[in-house]
Image (spheres, rainbow, N blue to C red):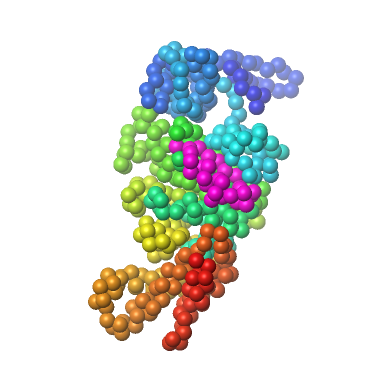
Amino acid sequence: MADQRVSIVERIRGYAPGKPRVIEPEAEGRITRSVGLTLEAIGLNVSVGRQCEVIAGDNRRIEAEVVGFAGDKVFLMPIKRVEGLQPGARVIPIATQQGMRIGPQLLGRVVNGIGQPLDGKGPLVGDEYLDFTPHEINPLQRHPISEPLDVGVRAINALITVGRGQRLGLFAGSGVGKSVLMGMMTKFTTADIVVVGLVGERGREVKEFIDHILGAEGLRRAVVVASPADDAPLMRLRASQLSSRIAEYYRDQGKNVLLLMDSLTRFAQAQREIALAIGEPPATKGYPPSVFAKIPQLVERAGNAAEGEGSITAFYTVLTEGDDLQDPIADAARAILDGHVVLSRKLAEEGTYPAIDVESSISRAMQNIVSEEHLKMMQRFKQLSSRYQQNRDLIAIGAYTPGADPETDLAIERFPHLRAFIQQGLKQPVHMAECIANLKALLKPTAPGKPTSPLAAQHRVQG
């Protein structure tokens, strides 16, 4: 019965083995109004979140979800695009359990927001049935972040070290390489399972990410949940939630999961479309209050389970419109996440990839998971980079006099090598031990006339 869709719902009262089931049909409703994305119906007695079917004029069944009500009116949001709908169309509550088959066979598959396969490889198979209901964990039962997760990217491993169970934001404007950086982490990470949520992206980008950036090697241990920009907002919302639910399943199996969601901004925009359509008043820059309530509900699902069990380390990309880091969604995400990685358009325009702005990025868990020596090296790297940036204009016009400040002189000498440290080839993983060794060699004092860092020469050969 759990996998069947019917036009009546079994309401079982006082059921026990040997007693007959009492089945009561639920009343059907009628569509009275269709405005924008919302359908209004009367005659229904259903709760928010309930699934219904709307019968279109050509007898097509359109699945919709109850998203609100006002008096005797019920507001429904279709999961897919609506065509052929007529006034007075029937609305039928359906008994369906939201879920999908899951198991090791799900790795390498691409599904949409309701768990239907998109890759043409046939129906999903698995040993278990995954209920879409979120798995809540008591915060006091979560194991603290205590060990690093190797993501294979030198700048992140060495300077913005990520801990298992940490949640970070990847803040970037359009066209600065966030998808490429996600693909590098997917292929290079030491995590057991990778779950990628592509929410609200262009359909072309979804295909390119899977084929060219993720590739066959990355897809082999990954699950991709895709809902492109032309999907209904409810489908985009569900894709975000399904990505987290799949990650929760593998965490419950004791796996270390890397969750990459692109993007948290599209998730917020989908919730904004739904909330405004049912009459919720806009607040900060057009975002209704429910958006800022939904973001923590999604983000808090990631993290560690109890000690000795699995973990979800999550990266949520945040689109900074106009490269504005004070955007409402960026500001809300930065407050709830455990750190952020900022991608700089200026670095991207200079040809530095990945274009990570080390000075603006931070990992709030780093001090708990790295050695004291590593932490001091990271701070020294930032100090030298910051000192150079503060005097960059003076240096460019020749107004700085060498010898005026020894710290600035050192920053000028080391800066090309600091920049080379951030750069990394798309097919060249750099794992944790090598990252720390490279950082140590970069900051090691050198005698006059000797090369500042062996990494610079190595980078020129690789580049």
Q: Is residue 173 left or right of residue 52?
A: left
Quarter of the picture holding the N terminus: top right
Q: Is residue 166 magenta?
A: no
Give x and y (percent) for residue 262: 48, 46
Give x and y (percent) for residue 23: 63, 16
For the stretch drawn in magenta, the main secondary structure is helix
Rendered view: 250 above or below 14: below
Residue 83 in sight in this render: yes
Q: Quadrant of residue 71?
A: top left
> Which residue is located at x 75 percent, y 19 percent?
18
Rendered view: 318 above or below 33: below
Residue 305 in sight in this render: no
Rendered view: 42 above or below 330: above
Q: Which residues are magenta?
A: 203-229
Q: Residue furthest bottom?
A: 448
> Which residue is located at x 54 percent, y 36 percent?
113
